[in-house]
Amino acid sequence: MTEEKGLNFIEEIVEEDLKEKKYLQIITRFPPEPNGYLHIGHASSICLNFGLTQKYGGYTNLRFDDTNPVTEETEYVESIKNDVKWLGFEWGNELYASDYFDTLYEYAIKLIKKGLAYVDDSTSEEIAALKGTPTEPGKNSPYRNRSVEENLDLFERMKNGEFADGSKTLRAKIDMAHTNMLMRDPVLYRIKHAHHHRTGDKWCIYPMYDFAHGQSDSIETVTHSICTLEFVPHRELYDWLIEKLEIYPSKQYEFARRNLTYTITSKRKLLQLVNDKYVDGWDDPRMTTISGLRRRGFTPESIRDFCDRIGVAKRENIVDIGLLEHCLREHLNKVALRRMVVLDPVKLVITNYPAGQTEEVYSENNPEAENNGGTRAIPFSNELWIEREDFMEVPAKKWFRLAPGAMVRLKSAYIIKCEDFAKDENGNITEIMCTYIPESKSGNDTSGIHVKGTIHWVSIRHAAKAEVRLYDRLFKVENPAAEEDDFLSYINPNSLKVIKTAYIEPSLKTAQPGAQFQFIRKGYFTLDKYSTPENLVFNRSVTLKDTWAKESKK
RNA sequence: UGGCCUAUAGUAUAAUGGUAGUACGACAGAUUUUGGUUCUGUUUGUCUUGGUUCGAAUCCAGGUAGGCCAACCA
């Protein structure tokens, strides 16, 4: 009955493997390096890896690829664990490549004994010089033919700290003329007298990515090791090492990383934005880090839905950030509580409503909620704040909000008619005078009047105040990384607009962290993590679709 | 002047030799006490040239375009 959704190419491989009974269960891993915060691109990988084992059975390990102590920190480990959990996934085991340093060291010795690895005294410049280029073969290192005994002795002394950083490396002995540059005697171990976030000062030699990743997969009996396209050339080395080491044959599969319009997902560039204070930390709501999206008010559901919709493939891509926003709106529409907030206030006086009188009107919390969100009371009086942009002295074509002589409904309250307005010496509207129609009260309207426009409002006497932060995309161009100039020159100067004083309806005073709101007609908002009851701060997660904005531009 | 990967509407992704579909977007309309939501309709696509085949987006060959590879990063 339901239309079957096509499988992505990795699911096809998994189904085929399962059909052939190649594996009893599948095991995947999500392998971040703890040197930065996770971003939306990682979310794709997380959803893919964890999604596969949820769908087909098995489990996914969270494994930190912590083989480079100089860039890695515990702070990042904690943020990564937090983000994966928040996205809604549970890992089978929490593991670290550094857990395997002893095993990896034994593997290296095994390779040396097989005559497949050697200690090289060349400097990195010398190694580079002998490496050749993609079109020219490399040349053998003068140290390539050391005896097994000498290599064993030298490698042990490397481990014991007898040599300075950079003075020696352990290299695989493969083929300096190989068409794959990675097979030209790749470096396996390097000397770094550096403190490691987990192993402390136990080691002064550390394995390279290629000598750690595949072996870690193998140790964990990972069946499908999924990574991004730039690792395609590494697969040959990955397989070579597994074969020569005679260990469990994990298989690597590569998919194209997801790019998003108006964003960057390079860890280096994200770090630069943070360090140089272009943004307020890794979790700045304009950042497409997981923590930034969370602070902005994105939900795990919406991010998972997004990852699901963009799919998995091998071709270069740049996904429209509008789709991410669509996924958020779709989810929030179902769960966000509707509230009235005036961001850019202008005073409206109802001249035929008794001054000093207050009555309560009732408004639905969410007309789209699955179990009907109920209603709340809102105080109404003769003096209201309304949105400045909801009044036009000279109405435009197709305008059906407030204008001289025009009628609109005040949401959940009465229909009013604009009788007059006042301006200051600069021509700014200072006050709008209206009369209301007593029989038009929402819920028992006997007036028989139908108006096309409905606007939101807050009673001046009852309004509370809050700071509201309006976010826009961080970059002005679709693909900042592909532009000529440095990506920093494409930062959108208007990516954050702060409204120090917005007027909020009284029920919002007790807003709780994490609650999602729709400020009616304005967008979806959530409390900022640094908001306090005394100084409320709301972040705009995303605007509502605005057909009028489009129409008025025509 | 090498090797590897990729090419389907504006974007992303299906179709696994048999009717080129879906989502987002765009456009038009209906509904609406949010110019929101919802609903309906329209629009736009197989990089190119050959070949195999009754039949090709799919298989093969050549071309073109884009990406990746020369860190003691991952």
Image (spheres, coloured by chain):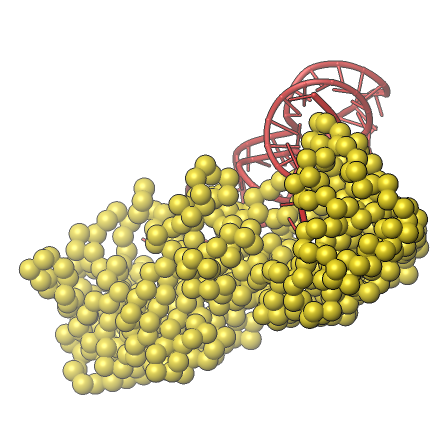
Chain colours: A yellow, B red
**Left or right placement of residue A472 versus residue A192 in this view:** left
Residue A470 appears in view: yes
Q: Residue A313 at what x, y percent from top left?
A: 69, 44
Q: Residue A142 at what x, y percent from top left?
A: 79, 38
In the image, residue B17 sits, relative to residue A104, either above or below, namely above
Residue located at (30% from left, 47% from top): A552
Name the one closer to the observer, A93 or A255.
A93
Q: Specify the quadrant that holds the C terminus of chain A.
A: top left
Tally of numbered discs = 0
Residue located at (39% from left, 71% from top): A538
**Left or right placement of residue A314 versus residue A150 in this view:** left
**Left or right placement of residue A443 versus residue A93 in this view:** left
Residue A25, quarter of picture = bottom right
Residue located at (46% from left, 59% from top): A275
Residue located at (18% from left, 64% from top): A418
Residue A445 appears in view: no
Q: Specify the quadrant that holds the N terminus of chain A.
A: bottom right
Q: Residue A326 at what x, y percent from top left?
A: 51, 55
Name the one closer to the observer, A162 or A98.
A162
Q: Residue A537 at what x, y percent from top left?
A: 38, 73
**Left or right placement of residue A318 versus residue A163 in this view:** left
Residue A58, quarter of picture = bottom right
Name the one closer to the observer, B19 or B72.
B72
Q: Residue furthest left?
A: A425
